[in-house]
Image (cartoon, rainbow, N blue to C red):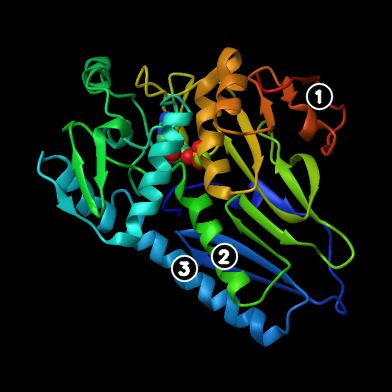
């Protein structure tokens, strides 16, 4: 089970494509971290260094887990207890950068990415080790929480001190935590002198360098089925993150209720089936993929632009695909027939 996106079918989410031969200097290891499998692929490093790197990354991922878990006892659950009161309180300095990034990204998304809606997520049953289940919560309870408008604007950060000006503010970093962990892992690999690698945490991926003379090739999950819809070659330093309504949801009386909530209504977002975002930084791509799931047809291009995102693939509920021009040039569809594609620039 995954701390941030429990019960995600990680094997299908995004795949490293292509097989390797025995003579290739490709080291691959799967570690169990953040409650799920994380795939690490390293090209061209000595096996001992690659093994050392995989062990170091396991520790990094475990640290993110014990720090940011939203409901199992963690630094975040202690923060949330204190946020319910008006008094300022200190936190460990290493927690501050992610909180600041989350606040900035939330602003940029116009509050559609809102890690301050922990209470709503709990009300919907999405903060639980159990598989989410119906029925949906009472409309009155959803309306009451939504009316309190918890937002990252309510989180005041001064030095290492936090203070909440809204008792309804409770943090849940589920939309950003995996991307953040992947960024930390890549930084760590670089410090160890590794230049060619992929870290894939349940489909939140960052790539550095290449696979020898070739780029890395990544598959993007088809939200309508078990396979991949498209593939893309990546190299240098780039992240690809996908959010979808198939990841964690329950069905009740024939209706799907998925784990990404629209903070404006308090109800599951119905803006898209899946959103894939490419960006240099996995934390930013992760926040953006969630925000664009909320944004919907009329707003997503505007929100992408405001968040500094150029490369997006959006799959709507009718199977239609919208792709921004830069990404369209790079994607290769892997299904037949190729879906209906519209190329649209961020506004
Ligand atoms: P992702 O798969 O990256 O889109 O993240 C989904 C997770 O983010 C959910 O399981 C919740 O923990 C959290 N979440 C849901 N809705 C939002 C939202 N509107 N803003 C921020 N976090 C959210
Ligand atoms: Mg996300």
Q: Nearer the viewer, mark 3 or mark 1?
A: 3
**Residue 120 seen anywhere in this rendered image of the structure:** no
Kindly identify which residue carries mark 2.
187
Q: Earlier in the sequence, mark 3 or mark 1?
A: 3
> At 87% from the left edge and 27% from the top edge, which residue is drawn?
337
* Alpha-carbon span between mark 3 and mark 2: 11 Å
Quarter of the image for the C terminus: give it: top right
Name the secondary structure under disc 3. helix
> At 55% from the left edge and 70% from the top edge, which residue is drawn?
188
Q: Earlier in the sequence, mark 3 or mark 2?
A: 3
Residue 216 at x, y percent in the picture: 79, 57
* Horizontal relation, residue 216 to residue 309: left or right: right
How many residues crowd mark 1 within 10 Å: few (<14), some (14–19), many (20+)? some
Residue 108's disc is none
Kindly identify which residue carries mark 3.
60
Residue 339's disc is 1
* Horizontal relation, residue 85 to residue 32: left or right: left
């Amino acid at each position: 089970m995954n701390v941030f996106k429990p019960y995600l079918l990680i094997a299908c989410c995004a795949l490293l494509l292509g097989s390797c031969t025995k003579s290739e200097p490709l080291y691959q290891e799967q570690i169990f971290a953040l409650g799920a499998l994380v795939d690490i692929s390293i090209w061209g490093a000595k096996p001992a260094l690659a093994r050392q790197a995989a062990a170091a990354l396991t520790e990094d991922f475990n640290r993110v887990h014990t720090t940011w878990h939203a409901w199992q006892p963690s630094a975040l659950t202690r923060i949330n207890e204190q946020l319910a009161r008006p008094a300022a309180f200190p936190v460990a300095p290493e927690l501050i950068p992610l909180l600041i990034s989350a606040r900035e990204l939330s602003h940029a998304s116009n509050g559609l990415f809102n890690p301050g809606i922990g209470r709503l997520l709990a009300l919907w049953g999405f903060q639980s080790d159990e598989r989410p289940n119906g029925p949906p919560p009472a409309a009155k309870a959803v309306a009451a929480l939504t009316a309190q408008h918890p937002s990252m604007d309510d989180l005041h950060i001064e030095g290492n001190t936090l203070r909440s000006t809204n008792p309804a503010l409770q943090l849940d970093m589920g939309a950003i935590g995996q991307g953040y962990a992947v960024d930390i892992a890549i930084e760590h690999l670089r410090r160890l002198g590794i230049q060619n690698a992929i870290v894939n945490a349940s489909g939140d991926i960052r790539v550095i360098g290449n696979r020898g003379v070739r780029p890395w090739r990544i598959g993007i999950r088809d939200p309508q089925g078990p396979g991949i819809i498209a593939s893309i070659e990546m190299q240098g330093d780039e992240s690809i993150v996908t959010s979808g309504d198939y990841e964690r949801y329950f069905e009740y009386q024939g209706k799907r209720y998925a784990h990404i909530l629209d903070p404006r209504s308090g109800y599951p977002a119905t803006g898209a089936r899946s959103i894939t975002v490419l960006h240099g930084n996995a934390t930013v791509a992760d926040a953006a993929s969630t925000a664009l799931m909320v944004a919907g047809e009329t707003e997503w291009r505007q929100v992408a632009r405001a968040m500094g995102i150029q490369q997006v693939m959006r799959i709507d509920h009718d199977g239609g695909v919208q792709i921004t021009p830069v990404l369209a040039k790079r994607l290769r569809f892997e299904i037949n027939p190729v879906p209906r594609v519209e190329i649209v620039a961020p506004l």
